[in-house]
Amino acid sequence: MAEPASPAAAELAQKIRAKAARVGVVGLGYVGLPLAVEYAGAGYYVTGIDISEPKVARLNAGDSYVGDVPSATLAPLVSAGKLRATADFSVIRDLDTIDICVPTPLRKTKDPDMSYIVAACEEIAKYFHPGMLVILESTTYPGTTDELVLPMLEKSGLKVGKDFFLCFSPERVDPGNPNYQTKNIPKVVGGTTAECTSLGHMFYSQALETVVPVSSTQVAEMVKLLENTYRMINIGLVNEMAVMCDGMGINVWEVIEAASTKPFGFMPFYPGPGLGGHCIPIDPFYLSWKTKQAGIEARFIELAGNINGQMPHFVVSKIQNALNDVGKAVKGSKIHVYGVSYKRDIDDVRESPAFDIFHLLQKRGGMVSYSDPHVPEILMEDGSRLRNDPEAMKTADCVVIVTNHSAFDYQELVEQAKLIVDTRNALKGIQSEKIVRL
Ligand SMILES: NC(=O)c1ccc[n+]([C@@H]2O[C@H](COP(=O)([O-])OP(=O)(O)OC[C@H]3O[C@@H](n4cnc5c(N)ncnc54)[C@H](O)[C@@H]3O)[C@@H](O)[C@H]2O)c1
């Protein structure tokens, strides 16, 4: 790395190297908390800032609310005074670095909702001071860092690349992945100026294993969107394959398994009941929104969004057909959803296709229940609450496997359930007339 050109950069670089830099993380959710823990573990004093008082209280009590961060890891860092949380943004006066990890959802119109980034930056701007490194990690459209965040920070009269430093670094965390976590997922970072990139690179290199610098914030922003769009489109393709195979009586899972034996040029993606989570169903629309402004239509994204969005309907029609085959209908039947989080072995239900499936079944007169060892209760669309009810599986007319948690006892399921629609190939290798596969 080149020697820093400005005095502020040189001072910050020295603090970062000496682990004397005071690290701040704004937004302590699935992304921010693991990052804060990583820096505290690397020897920095870390302050997390979150508007959620319950999260602040739990963190300060050493009680983790994020599956990938065990309380046994968090608590010693809190007791050693290395990590603390607050809802008071004035602590920024004493911080040297800030990673912004706030939500970036879509509005109902599928337009980006930038309100969380704007609110966080407004607070940061109030206490902004020379020598700070600010890194946006929230997934967003290309241009956000330089077009939206930079002007808010430059209102202070400070100059980027000279008095303060600004980067974008996409967050790639994969909740529930036992092999890849914040520390060993390579971190891409791009700054507004070369000096910014260089400081961002140095900052992440202190706590994370691999850092990949790129030439601008826009490239870094686009990297994340390429990664997630790639996944969304390939899932769309394989979902369409599943529908085609279903129409032709071919087992799509066997097709994918055999195609995966090709040692080059093929990467398996798997069909399912629909997209879920905070990233894959949402991020590509940040890109399509932005490209529309440049007169470019993101046709792959729209098409894949359409196909993926149809999957809950396809699953419900499979349930309906399966019930019809045993002389029943959805109307008046008890249907049990097996797994409601958006993917295996996590407790996150955001955007889970289980909700679409519940809604469609209820609309057709079905009576729904669910079991999920990771999710004790869910809030339904109509405001009512449904509780985890594993016993209901035994009396249901049909069980639909929406999430293939490893904690489920599939053998017991096959023995006790009357009829099963398996959208995840969770019952691979088990032969039974009760099973209808996607
Ligand atoms: N969860 C993932 O798997 C994942 C993976 C990669 C990228 N991302 C991206 O990372 C970002 C954060 O996602 P997340 O899953 O951690 O979200 P999250 O909802 O779990 O956490 C966000 C936190 O920010 C807090 N917050 C909201 N507004 C705030 C404000 N103005 N000031 C301070 N705190 C505020 C919330 O209280 C919450 O604790 C999003 O852009 C998301 O798309 C998420």
Image (cartoon, helix red, strand yellow):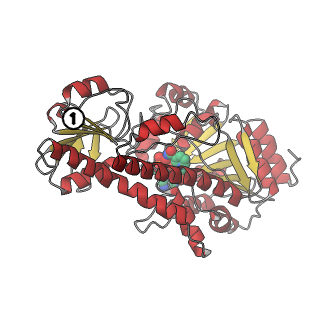
Q: Amino acid at mark 1?
A: Asp
Image coords of residue 393 (percent x, y) = 20, 33
Quarter holding the C terminus is top left
Residue 305 image-quadrant placement: bottom left
Q: Secondary structure at mark 1?
A: loop
Question: Which sits in the foreground, 51 or 260?
Answer: 260
Q: Is residue 215 left or right of residue 276?
A: right
Task: Tell whether 26 sits left or right of 221.
Answer: left
Locate residue 349, reporting x and y percent. 37, 45
The local crowd at label 1, few if under 14, some if 14 to 19, many if 20 or more residues have their Cα within 10 Å, is: some
Residue situated in front as seen by the camera: 354 or 114: 354
Residue 369 occupies which quadrant of the picture?
top left
Identified at 42% across, 46% down, the residue is 53
**Rendered position, 277 above or below 258:** below
Does mark 1 have its CB less than 8 Å from ligand 1? no
Q: Which residue is mark 1?
A: 389
Q: Position of residue 421 (x, y in %)?
A: 28, 40
Q: Is residue 123 above or below residue 406?
A: below
User: What is the x, y in percent for residue 131?
Assistant: 75, 53
Front residue of 188/116: it is 188
Q: Is residue 409 above or below residue 204?
A: above
Q: Would residue 373 be seen by someone viewing this image from the given angle?
A: yes
Q: Residue at x 54, y 31 (%)?
A: 78
Q: Nearer the viewer, residue 417 or 20?
A: 417
Residue pictured at 86% horizontal, 55% vertical:
6
